[in-house]
Image (cartoon, coloured by chain):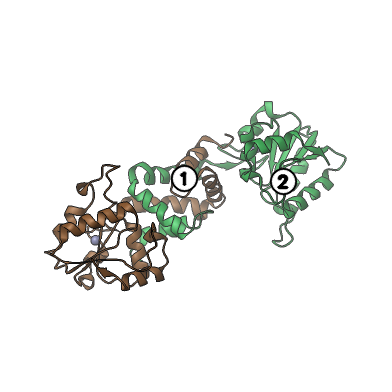
Chain colours: A brown, B green
């Protein structure tokens, strides 16, 4: 390689990010070097800031700057509805649609026999513990329409059967679709038309 | 937005990189936060290292860690051949093919009437100054097969007419194609079959 070791090391690290390959990592790094003062240094500073400040909410798994996230801290969001999602990207997608006014629970993945991920590896025990103290009356299972997502939804539904109303996103989520890929309108429609399990 | 201001600021900066949009920037940032110790902090450190160490070669415009790049410093590369490219990504693409053993000259763009980019905005005067002192006998115009790339090649060819042998990459570069998108074999074939202008 003609690029110096430092540049190549940076390209290799960037290429490990999802959605980037070696070629797009090279383009991104060259772009950043060209805009060193405007982009490279501020971006590095911001990464350090995020690395130092971001916490996982102890209650729901969302990201924030304190041990409990803004949504868990807001009394306005305590309306008895709890939306269960696989990861933070899905929570952000729900929030962008603006239609859900309750709280969230981020599982941190899905059950997977293949990858040996059981309930204890996810935030499922913590979910079951939240129902009574927080006065949850409805749990919306907003999991991806994948095999693992639906397996996980059924497992959680079994655990909560008879304790709360259980619903899932309905109309609008395409087969095999992932929430984070959907537009806001589709998410809004899916939530409005949610059906009881 | 439910993500904290710090995270959102990082996403916005990442989304400005070529090849990334808002959604892929969100995915990349979440991935980095998950791998904070392994990826986010080391990546930020490496960006600072590159921002502090990388220099543009005063002779050819390549990137390196000193005022003259490794290729310009290597006497082995002083074979009388000078390969003119638009940007550093193109130089890297040429080097990956491994077939060119001379030196480079990175223009830093192309002439463009639309963007008011003339010879003085590029490294063209510096190119003309290199010919005699470095004993250049052949200038290979390895510019992209775009309108601006070919306009620039013709302009340089006019300036150097009669002073050196002028060649261009021939077979293998598709119409409208950009060097950095080509595989190594195509670049090798194009260089081997280069034709005199
Ligand atoms: Zn929370
Ligand atoms: Zn150089």
Q: Position of residue A173 (x, y in %)?
A: 37, 64
Provide the secondary structure element on which disc 1 rests: helix
The reply to whether residue A71 is in sight is: yes
Judging by the rendered image, the residue that carries numbered circle 2 is B143
Task: Report the number of numbered marks.
Answer: 2
CB atoms of marks 2 and 1 within 8 Å: no
Q: Nearer the viewer, residue A197 or A15?
A: A197
Report the quarter where the N terminus of chain A lies: top right
In the rendered image, residues at marks 2 and 1 fall on the same chain: no
Q: Is residue B76 left or right of residue A98?
A: right
**Tag of residue A141:** none
**Tag of residue A14:** 1
Chain hosting mark 2: B
Residue A195 sits above or below residue B196 on the image: below
Instruction: For label 1, count other residues whose C-alpha is less than 10 Å away and answer few (under 14), some (14-19) or many (20+).
Output: many
Is ligand 2 within 8 Å of the beta carbon of the residue shown at mark 1? no
Chain hosting mark 1: A
Q: Position of residue B133 (x, y in %)?
A: 77, 34
Instruction: For label 2, count other residues whose C-alpha is less than 10 Å away and answer few (under 14), some (14-19) or many (20+).
Output: many
Residue displayed at 28% across by 52% down? A108
Q: Is residue B157 left or right of residue B34?
A: right
Residue displayed at 27% across by 44% down? A113
The reply to whether residue A58 is in sight is: no
Report the quarter where the C terminus of chain A lies: bottom left
Q: Position of residue B131 (x, y in %)?
A: 78, 37
Residue displayed at 50% across by 45% down? A21
Q: Quadrant of residue B190?
A: top right
Provide the secondary structure element on which disc 2 rests: loop
């Amino acid at each position: 390689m003609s690029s110096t070791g430092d540049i190549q090391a940076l390209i290799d690290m960037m290429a490990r990010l999802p959605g980037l390959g070696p070629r797009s990592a090279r383009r991104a790094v060259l772009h950043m070097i060209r805009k060193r003062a405007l982009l490279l240094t501020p971006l590095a500073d911001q990464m350090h800031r995020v690395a130092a400040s971001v916490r996982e909410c102890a209650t729901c798994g969302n990201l924030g700057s304190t041990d409990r996230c803004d949504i868990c801290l807001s009394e306005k969001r305590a309306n008895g509805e709890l939306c269960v999602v696989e990861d933070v990207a899905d929570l952000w997608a729900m929030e962008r649609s603006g239609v859900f006014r309750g709280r969230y629970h981020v599982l941190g993945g899905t059950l997977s026999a293949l990858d040996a991920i059981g309930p204890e590896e996810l935030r499922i025990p913590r979910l079951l513990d939240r129902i009574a103290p927080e006065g949850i009356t409805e749990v919306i299972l907003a999991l991806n329409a994948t095999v693992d997502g639906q397996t996980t939804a059924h497992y959680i539904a079994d655990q909560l059967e008879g304790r709360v109303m259980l619903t899932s996103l309905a109309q609008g989520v395409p087969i095999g679709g992932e929430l984070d890929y959907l537009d806001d309108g589709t998410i809004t429609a899916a939530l409005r038309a949610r059906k009881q399990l």
